[in-house]
Image (cartoon, grey):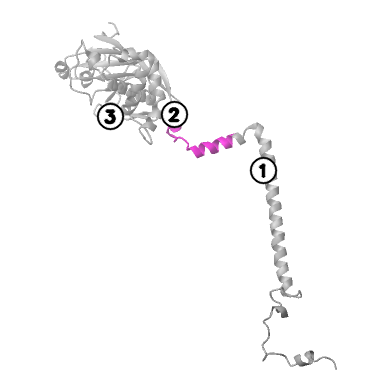
Amino acid sequence: MSERIEWHDEADVLGVRVRAWFFDPVQTALLANPVLQLLPMLSDAPPKPHSPLAQRSSHSVGCLTAQPDAVLVHGDGLLCLTHKGGDARLHELAHWQRDLRADAMLQAIAHAMAVAGQQQRPTVALWRATNVVYQFDPSPPVLECLATHIGAARHYWNEPVAINPAQLARFCEPRLRALPGLAQSAATLSG
Amino acid sequence: MIQVQIASQLTRRGVSGLRWVLVENGDAAAAPAPAPAQRLADAAESAAQAPGNNARATVSLTLLRAATLALGLVAAGWSASLVLGKARSTGSAPPPASARPLPAAASPPPSASQTPAAAPLLTAGPP
């Protein structure tokens, strides 16, 4: 059996390689394993929760503190999943790039950075909507932009100790859109 | 700096393909930006600590100390002369001008009733 996941679609969005896996939310809700309800494409080897699913653990790197919805152990690495707080709209396979919000994508990457920094393990950034799971593979410029603007974002938001991924994402999104190489892929996002 | 590893690939049994980036440590990032005055002080301090300026700063400091010491000695001597002069004036020294009686020219003209008794002798000329 191939280890590779057959993603339904993928594209470059704002300097991030986004892979999408669509599923039927009604069928998925009937699965017994709560982890598979969140990530139905990993039915062959379901990840193990790093901390109880009902408990949102806090992870920090530098002045960035995140509380992802779930952190899962998957082989040698971790999966950082955010799914709460998103809208309840069904994303369409043909127009998912229009439905995907840039701030949600950047927040998911920032969450994964905090988890990876604290746990010192390679981490995948995932975001789950009602009927689709997105995996985000940020390019080096995107990672560098997020990592190097944590301090500036903290000053901008006037936070004495730390900022959260939403604040970092809102601070960095216009800067990413202004990067010359990313402007073309940014045009597909409504923001 | 803290290393952050983001996996680029998700497979059915694990993760693969690492991208990494460095994040500034929380202590350094949390330190507030220095105020302009503090920045100026730091700049002056760093300039004074430069190797070329070190000997010049030492010489200036020595001269400044010597000048301060000399000024203190002069002030002490002046204060002592004032105190000793006052003590001399209250002892064997003649009274100061303000303590002496006014000269005759400065006194008001005597009235007729206050004319001394020897005055007729003075006005009487020789025979």
Tell me which corner region of the image, top left, top right, bottom left or bottom right, holds residue A148.
top left
What segment is highlighted magenta in the picture?
B25-46
Residue B7 shows in this picture: yes
* Numbered label attached to residue B61: 1
Residue behind mark 3: A56
User: Are circles 3 and 1 on residues that touch, CB within 8 Å?
Assistant: no
Tell me which corner region of the image, top left, top right, bottom left or bottom right, holds residue A36.
top left
Q: Amino acid at mark 1?
A: Leu
Dividing the image into 4 quarters, which one contains the C terminus of chain B? Answer: bottom right
Residue behind mark 2: B25
Is label 2 in a helix, a strand or a loop? loop
Question: Which residue is at 60% across, 34% downward?
Answer: B47
* Numbered label attached to residue A114: none
Q: Nearer the viewer, residue B71 or A137?
A: B71
Q: Is residue A55 left or right of residue B79?
A: left
Q: Amino acid at mark 2?
A: Asn
Tell me which corner region of the image, top left, top right, bottom left or bottom right, holds residue B97.
bottom right
Distance from Cα at disc 3 to Cα at disc 1: 61 Å
Distance from Cα at disc 3 to Cα at disc 2: 23 Å
Question: Which residue is at 30% across, 22% downward?
Answer: A108
